[in-house]
Amino acid sequence: MGYQAYIRSFADHDGDGMGDLRGIVDKVDYLAWLGVDAVWINPFFPSPGHDHGYDVSDYVDVDPQHGTLADFDELISATRKVGIRVIVDIVPNHTSNEHAWFTAAVADPTGPFRDFYIWKPPAADGGPPNNWVSHFGGPAWTFEPVSGEYYCHLFLPEQPDLNWQNPAVADAFDTALRFWLDRGAAGFRIDVAHGCHKDPLFRDNPQLRTVTPNMSPRAVFDSFDHRFDLDQDTNIEVFRRWNQVVEPYGAVLIGELGAEDAERAARYVADGDALHQLFYLRSTWLEWEPAEWKTSIESLQAIAPGGVSWVLSCHDRPRPATRFGRGVDDQRAISRSLALSTLAMVLGGMPFVYQGEELGLPDGNVDPNSVTDPLAARFSQWAGEGRDGCRTPMPWDSTPNNGFTRGEPWLKSAPRPAELTVESQRDDPESTIHRYRDLLAFRHKTPQLCEGQARVLDLGPSVIAIERPHCLAITNLATEAFSVDLSTLTLPGGPWHQSFSSKNGVLEAKNDSFSEVAAESTSIYLNGAPS
Ligand code: BGC
């Protein structure tokens, strides 16, 4: 199991209110106790911070607010001692507008860095060159008065998109990847992996519906078919090249993939010579929608078996305890998350939990005057689309600022109650954190969960069933228990015994062909002699 540490909010070692690399070093024992195998750290490179680190101004250094290169080395050494790998978050679609490449590109339109970015003359009416819109609102083009050209940015104007048609860009990224690999990174989470290449003709995206002035940036974005700005076939070539770079290090490439279409997403991992795993973003958008979950998991399992790093949440979307909790009590929302996290253990890829998911944490409460996310801060009328709620500091204990910092936290939020802190849950064997810890321990001692080929079984509209030669997982998404007679299923192995349930953890092994999977839960069965 992987663990996402959102560095800004994970742990602050030096007391300046901002999470840092040494804060993660301080918590390595915690990660080892929980049983994680790898930690993905959000960008910690120098950045002006317009998009909280996703506007990188130097790919081969550490932002002073997050520490130093020596701190990174210390993190590598501390994690190696406990067998945890470090995954670095790399951002190839765009840089910061303060990156030296971009400032040189603006200062010297005939110089070598101009072509690192995407420049186009204005359209005939003087407006943007085409109809592309930014994820964060407004056109995906900003006019640069000195040269009289527009530059492309799929996110903020402060995040100009790189030109991946330019071989010098690819060379620069090879260098950055090797820099972190040589320092001990075990792989990369690739930001907006579906973004790098653009249509060579820069054609208008087909418009799906009329855009009106009162639409949110997300609604405007969704009003277009993004066939020309995203997910170009040539993107895969970028990751074929990266695959060659990381291969000698045995490192892994996990791409953030926004492609809605499972077939298209699967192409990035299909031949094993580009990305190794996908973060398939749809799973962070879904609420508790059983039919949607069933389709998403089954279709990707059929097309890209083992190719998905399943995630229920990340720093961009409401947490599962919030998304799955609408209209039901907190415990039920947590049970739903645990059901899906347990199923993820047999799907073949390395699932990730986002910091705080192991506590069953809902989104934090951020005062509207304290919002910092550009989505909310720049469009106050769309504050609800902001991502601050899922980014509030990790609650370690019940001291001030829940033990995250002894300074003023960078993001102010309401204190968390004691029962949602690591300190109190560690002491309570019935708590959510122990459910996750038990699940991770079960996965470690049960290699059968990933062995052999996985097959999707059809056991009904509200049930997801995945069978491997020596294990069977049944997720019941319905509100009533699901009864199954294992002897009637055409499964090769047997006898089967229920070994784990997302409701009760590890179970005492007993052979019984009849089983009941509780509502909104997952049961895992093993065959052969109980161990
Ligand atoms: C990251 C976001 C970021 C965006 C632009 C994403 O998908 O996860 O946090 O704002 O890329 O870099």
Image (cartoon, rainbow, N blue to C red):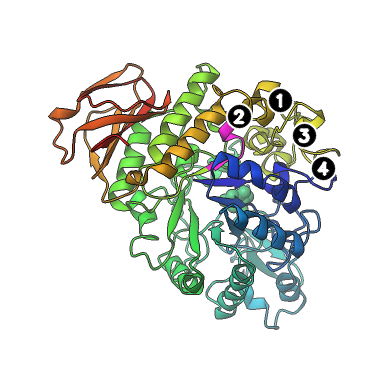
The amino acid on which the numbered mark 4 sits, given as a three-letter code, is: Gly
Indicate whether 56 appears above or below 313: below
Q: Nearer the viewer, residue 458 or 355?
A: 355
Callout 2: CB less than 8 Å from ligand 1: no
**What amino acid type is highlighted by mark number 1?**
Arg
Local secondary structure at mark 4: loop
Is tag 4's residue or tag 2's residue first in the polypeptide sequence? 4
**Is 267 left, or right, of 19 in this rendering?**
left
Please give the residue where the numbered disc 3 appears in the rendered image.
403
Mark 3 or mark 4: name the one nearer the start of the chain.
4
Sequence order check, earlier mark of 1 and 2: 2
Magenta residues? Answer: 353-360
Dot 1 corresponds to which residue?
416
Q: Answer whether residue 358 is magenta in the image.
A: yes
Q: Secondary structure at mark 2?
A: loop
Camera-side residue of 323 and 231: 323
Residue type beneath disc 2:
Leu
> Which residue is tagged 2?
361
Q: Position of residue 506 (x, y in %)?
A: 41, 29
